[in-house]
Image: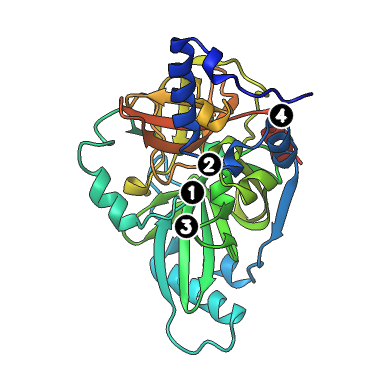
């Protein structure tokens, strides 16, 4: 197709104004972010993979029955002391030359410290609105897990948390920025996924625990990091517990969907599963209309919920918790659509 030069003098005044608005919108992105659509489509369809360091038998050994189990609680338990000791031992095995004590820094999948999220979001910004605590049992709730990613860096374990959803016995879907963090230099060293998870003061309760084996995202997310391609997947291996049900994927959903729900483990309340409900519409040109958006604190995608599912009234996954921003007209939550590229990568 031949390129046409813009005839600025021949434009109507209203068209000039609209064009300037569009330029201002696109100006918030880098030149690479506004690459031609065919380049973006090609890169978003190309998979980038990473093999995680595998846990040893120590991980299964620290799992105990939840002997004081209450109604709705998971079957198994790991104490805080056992979890911290295991985590430090795994770091030292990956770096035998390191002799000091290992420091752990907990952050969300958005590379924000948990302490900062707790301080900010216990105020009026998020918690009093649409988010509510829901059981981690039943369907589809029990099919939503919390992923813990460990980045080993110079005596410090950066522990990222995000959310995932189970699609078959080998794969979970999640956000691209959960699998591949530009802020932390790429893929994590290792990690785990919990289903039916609840955090207590003495440890973690859960129904099943998996280790991460392979992380997958797409070339566009790795190269550009734009929310237009914020999707990923994880292959995993069952370590302990029961197998949750699978969620089905709705490929190429409508431009707007009513009565949707999203799920995830937010940074300000990671001890329990949270959910919200409302309506979503196709997102802005900033992300090439590859996302859904919900405005004014209706469907909430809070820090830590990234990677969790957005489901329709039939509990089919139509999107993935991705971003939260303010356009100046109210708070907006964004969700990666279940596009062809998203669908194909998750089910590889």
Q: Is residue 140 left or right of residue 53?
A: left
Circle 2 sits on which residue?
307
- Mark 1 vs 2, N-terminal side: 1
Residue 103 screen position, x and y as percent: 41, 75
Residue 260 screen position, x and y as percent: 48, 21
Q: Are marks 1 and 2 in contact (CB under 8 Å)?
A: yes
Query: Label 1 to label 2, Cα distance in Å?
Result: 6 Å
Q: Dot 3, crowdedness within 10 Å: few (<14), some or many (≥20)?
A: many
Circle 4 sits on which residue?
340
- Mark 2 vs 3, N-terminal side: 3
Q: Please tell me which residue is depicted at 46% across the width and 38% down the height of the picture.
A: 28
Q: Is residue 317 left or right of residue 16?
A: right
**What is the quadrant of the N terminus in the image?**
top right
Q: Are marks 2 and 3 in contact (CB under 8 Å)?
A: no
Query: Label 1 to label 3, Cα distance in Å?
Result: 7 Å
Mark drawn on residue 162: 1
Residue 236 screen position, x and y as percent: 67, 52
Q: Please tell me which residue is depicted at 43% across the width and 18% down the height of the picture.
A: 17
**Local SS, label 3:** strand
Query: Label 2 to label 3, Cα distance in Å?
Result: 12 Å
Circle 3 sits on which residue?
160
């Amino acid at each position: 197709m031949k390129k046409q030069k813009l005839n600025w003098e021949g434009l109507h005044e209203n068209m000039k104004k609209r064009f300037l608005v569009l330029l201002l919108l696109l100006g918030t992105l880098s030149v690479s972010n506004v690459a031609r659509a065919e380049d973006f489509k090609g890169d978003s369809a190309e998979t980038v993979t990473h093999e995680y360091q595998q846990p040893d038998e120590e991980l299964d050994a620290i799992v105990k029955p939840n002997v004081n189990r209450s109604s709705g609680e998971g079957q198994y338990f790991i104490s805080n002391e056992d979890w911290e000791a295991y985590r430090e031992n795994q770091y030292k095995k990956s770096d035998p030359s390191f002799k000091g004590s290992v420091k752990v820094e907990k952050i969300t999948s958005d590379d924000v410290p948990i302490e900062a999220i707790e301080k900010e979001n216990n105020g009026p910004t998020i918690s009093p609105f649409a988010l509510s605590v829901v059981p981690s049992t039943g369907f589809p709730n029990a099919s939503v897990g919390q992923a813990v990613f460990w980045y080993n860096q110079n005596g410090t374990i950066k522990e990222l948390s995000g959310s995932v959803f189970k699609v078959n016995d080998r794969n979970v879907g999640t956000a691209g920025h959960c699998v591949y963090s530009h802020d932390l230099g790429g893929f994590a060293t290792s990690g785990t996924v919990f289903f039916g998870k609840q955090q207590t003061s003495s440890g973690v309760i859960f129904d099943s625990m998996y280790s991460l084996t392979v992380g997958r995202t797409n070339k566009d997310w790795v190269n550009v990091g734009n929310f237009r391609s914020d999707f990923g997947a994880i292959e995993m291996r069952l370590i302990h517990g029961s197998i949750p049900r699978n969620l089905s994927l709705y490929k190429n959903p409508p431009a707007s969907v009513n009565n949707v729900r999203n799920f995830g483990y937010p940074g300000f309340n990671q001890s329990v599963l949270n959910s919200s409900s409302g309506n979503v519409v196709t997102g802005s040109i900033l992300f090439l209309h590859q996302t859904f958006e919900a405005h004014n604190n209706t469907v909430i995608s809070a820090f830590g919920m990234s990677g969790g599912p957005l489901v329709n009234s039939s509990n089919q996954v139509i999107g993935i918790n991705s971003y939260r921003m303010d356009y100046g007209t109210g708070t907006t939550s964004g969700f990666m659509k279940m596009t062809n590229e998203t669908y194909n990568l998750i089910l590889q």
